[in-house]
Image (cartoon, grey):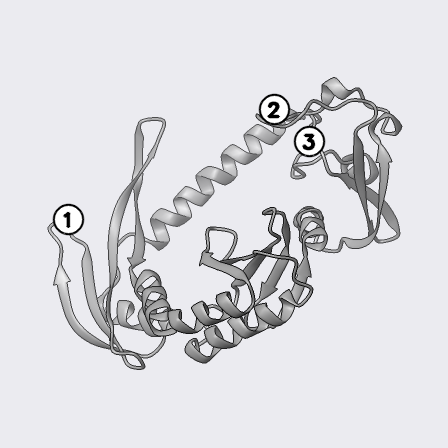
Amino acid sequence: MKKIWKVLFGVLAMAGISALILSSCHVKSESQIVSYANRNFGSAELVATQAAENGGRTCIFRDKEYGFEYYVKSEMHDIIIDGSKFGSTESTDSDFSSKYYALLMSTCQSKFDEIAKSDSVEITDGDGFNFMKIKLISANDNFLETAEKIADIIISFDSRKYYKESSLGIYDRNDKRLGAYHIHEKKWVDADDEYDYIYINEAKQVNRKAEFVRKEKMLFKDTGLEPSQVTVFLGTPEYTYETPVQYYYFSVDGKEFFIADFITDYDASLIRHYSNYNEVFH
């Protein structure tokens, strides 16, 4: 079975490479870059177009709402696999995101500072997980009001909804994550529910018809596995029979399967965590 999957993935990988080569075999034209900029970043004026020595093309734009300039560039990059070249593919890059964020902060920083002082919170730049990080300096039962005020400031700036998928990460004074406040939706998702989404999304990836049914907590000794089968990562404790675990149950066409919140050496194909999906459906 493993060999079949390896062959299949190899074929799919080669097919994907071929598709890239066929569909992205040249840099974007000026008109294509202009279309890309307006579609992804909002209405803008083309200021200049520059040709690069490597055959790439860079267009300079001026944002029509705020007047700052940014670039969008299109370049070709070689596809190298195991030291061999498989043609080349186009990539499009821009510094719009950093320029837009810098303008947001320079425009709204004083308002953020006022909220930080009045609501006893720290507001810092985000990371790959948070747009911004909001840390409570003291006990604060009204942190959702604080998050809403910060979101309102961002929304008033971001009328084009460039940050429509972004959220504020909320942490207590001990740096424990409480959850996320989605800026444009003005929706709160607590940390437990965020954690659940990992497994719900994993189930949807393996079968788009999967519907979440319930979750159950148990001790590892109830799983029927040996602690030595669990894959643990650097800095995390080894599993024992008394380690608490959680099972997420899903239903597809009347059949039920689970995904557990730990990883083993078990070959679950498309499912990263321990699961009985294959046994149920194959």
Location of the C terminus (image quadrant): top right
Of callouts 3 and 2, which one flags the residue occurring earlier in the amino acid sequence?
2
* Amino acid on which disc 1 is placed: Asn
- To which residue does mark 3 refer? 263
Determine whether 44 is above or below 261 in the image.
below
SS at mark 1 in the image: loop
Mark 3 vs mark 2, CA separation in Å: 21 Å
SS at mark 3 in the image: loop
User: Decide: marks 1, 3 in contact (CB < 8 A)?
Assistant: no
* Amino acid on which disc 3 is placed: Ile
At a point 61% along the width and 24% down the height, the residue shown is: 3
- Label 2 packing within 10 angstroms: few (<14), some (14-19), many (20+): few
* Amino acid on which disc 2 is placed: Lys
Q: Position of residue 202 (x, y in %)?
A: 67, 46
Mark 2 vs mark 1, CA separation in Å: 41 Å
Q: Where is residue 225 in the image (x, y as percent from the top left)?
A: 81, 23
At a point 55% along the width and 29% down the height, the residue shown is: 7
Task: Choose top left, top right, bottom left or bottom right for residue 60.
Answer: bottom left
- Label 1 packing within 10 angstroms: few (<14), some (14-19), many (20+): few
Residue 54: assigned label: 1
Determine whether 55 is above or below 268 in the image.
below
Task: Choose top left, top right, bottom left or bottom right for residue 184.
Answer: bottom right
Task: Choose top left, top right, bottom left or bottom right for residue 217.
Answer: top right
SS at mark 2 in the image: helix
At a point 69% along the width and 22% down the height, the residue shown is: 238
- To which residue does mark 2 refer? 3
Q: Which of marks 3 and 2 is in front?
A: 3
Mark 1 vs mark 3, CA separation in Å: 45 Å
Which residue occupies the extreme left position in the image? 53
- Label 3 packing within 10 angstroms: few (<14), some (14-19), many (20+): some
